[in-house]
Each structure stands twice: as structure tokens, then as C-alpha cells.
Amino acid sequence: MDRNPALLEPMDMPDPQFPLKLNHCRFERVGTTAFYPHWHEHMEILYIIEGQARISCNADSYDVGPGEMIVVNCADLHHGVCLSDRLFYYAVIFDPDLLHSNRIDSAEAKFITPIVRSRIRFANRVTGDAAIRDSLDELIREFESKEFAYELSIKSCLYRLLAAMLRGHVTERMPEGELASRIRRLKQIEPVLQHIETHYAERLDVETLAGIAGMSRYHFSRVFKELTSRSVTDYINFVRIGRCEQDLRYTNKTISEIAIENGFSDIYYFSRLFKSYRGVSPSALRGKHSHG
């Protein structure tokens, strides 16, 4: 897919009166970027049907396969890479406002409003939950067939899905107003994340990046860690190591070439750092994925 120059992805819905869409996502080459880092104000569920993918949400990465799901909360930074020759997944994207009711009942007050306002946030990785999988399967069937009253059936699926998520997969309860603050901060550091994404192999220092964000070094470092759960240096290394791993898996470049091309001038430091991030040395990983 083409690189989107903005991290905030515009979310056009086929039917604005029913803000839900279903994307069929197919890739046929290992190492392909499924989607570049971005965020949006809708919820998204990535449902893996075939193959393997590595999905990063904020500072965490998850290797997922058939039957597993990634839940992308509002304003989660996420990024995907194909790890197999064939990858197919559904992306279910919806505006939680779809589930609002006109009457303020206990379900609305206790669950729907906090979800809409992103005060309740869910774990990114969901595996082995039959209730969620069954709800997704039915939602997909209804959306694709579009039989009479499919909208009612889909809303029913979403309610059941969220009930299962609330029972077993809540990870955070965000204070009132925190989402708007998070989105403001994301927009502030968006140019920095874009700069790291395109210049990760170059020398990057905190002062320069803080200047791009228009912040003091101290304030920038604090905000950056709040949003990504990583220090600036750790995040840069996280991006570099990810690129190095792809090269180790899918190219015939030497380990030294890979290290240098991705911003590491010291091969020994690179090897130690790679092992600390991936739990295996570059040479051991290369041995598992030799291209001859």
C-alpha cells in the first residue's frame, strides 16, 4: 500500500448513517508493509484468517495468526507487517457512536458512553475467545450478504462483541477528558514520528526532534513517553531493530550491511541490542531464515 503522509487517517464511511465498514486485506509477500503507522478516532478490529502478521500498537508488537484478533482503540498508533507468503485478514472499522441510544439507561451510562469517549480501553491482542470470534463471524456474514435488516443484526453482533470484551479484555480505564488531551498530544508529535519513520537510519537527537515538535527537550521527552510508553532513544532503536529484523529475514545482505544501513555503526553494539529486543542474536535469526 502507499505510504500515507499523515498519521491521522481520514475515515470515510460508505454509509455515513451507518458508520461501519469491512475491508478485505490481502498480501502475498513476506516483509510487505500491510499498513504504515497511523491512528484514527474509530475502533478497529483486525481478524486474521490466513497467514501471519506482526501488528504494533503504541509501543507493543504482537505476532498473530489465524483466528487471532487485534483490537485498535481510538488514538492507538498502529503498524502492520506481513510475516508470511500469504496473509488475509478482515479489518472491521466502526464509530462507537453507532451504538448510542436516545435514552440514557444503565447500559448506556455504564458501558456505551465510556467506550465512545474512550475511557474504557481494551487489550490489543485477543486470542482464544470463542464469543468474540463468533460475533465477528456473524457480523462479517451479515455485512457481506446485506439481507433485509442486516443493520439490526450487525448492531446486535457489536453489542455481543463488546460485552465479551468488557468481561475479559479491559486493560485501562481512562479519566474523563484524557482522550482529547491524548489526541492533541498525538498531533503535536506527529511530525516527529513521521521524521523517525523516514530518517531512522540517520543520526537523530532529542534536541532536534523536540524542535520539530515545537517543545522544550524536557516537555517533549515526557509527552513522547506518555504516548508511546518508550523513551525517544528506545523508540528509535525499536524502529531500527524492526527494519533490521525484516532485512535479516528477507534479504541476503550481510549482518554488517544491515546494521550500517539501519543506523548502527558498531556491529557489536547492534548485536547486543538486537538480542535484548528480540531474545535472539542476529546471526541466530539469520540462520533460521537463510536465503542461500
Image (spheres, rainbow, N blue to C red):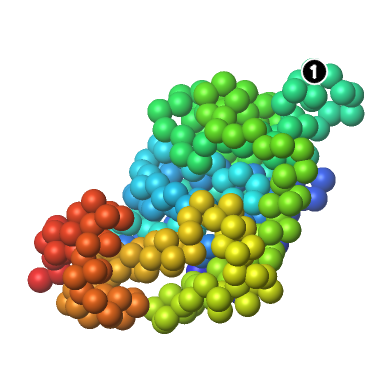
Q: Is residue 40 left or right of residue 141?
A: right
The quarter holding residue 86 reads: bottom left
Res. 65 visible in picture: yes
Position of the C terminus by quadrant: bottom left
Q: Nearer the viewer, residue 177 or 290?
A: 177
Q: Is residue 82 above or below residue 51?
A: below
Crowd around label 1: few <14 · some 14–19 · many ≥20 (10 Å) = few
Q: Nearer the viewer, residue 80 or 207?
A: 207
Res. 157 visible in picture: no
Direction front: furthest residue: 218
The quarter holding residue 283 reads: bottom left
Q: Is residue 15 left or right of residue 44?
A: right
Mark 1, residue position:
106
Q: Is residue 215 above or below residue 59?
A: below
- x%, y% of residue 247? 27, 70
Residue at image coords 38%, 58%: 82
| Total residue callouts | 1
- x%, y% of residue 139? 60, 34
- x%, y% of residue 130? 46, 24
Q: Is residue 82 left or right of residue 265?
A: right
Residue at image coords 66%, 60%: 186
Q: Is residue 259 left or right of residue 14?
A: left
Q: Is residue 69 above or below residue 227?
A: above
The quarter holding residue 281 reads: bottom left
What's the residue type where badge 1 is placed? Answer: Ser
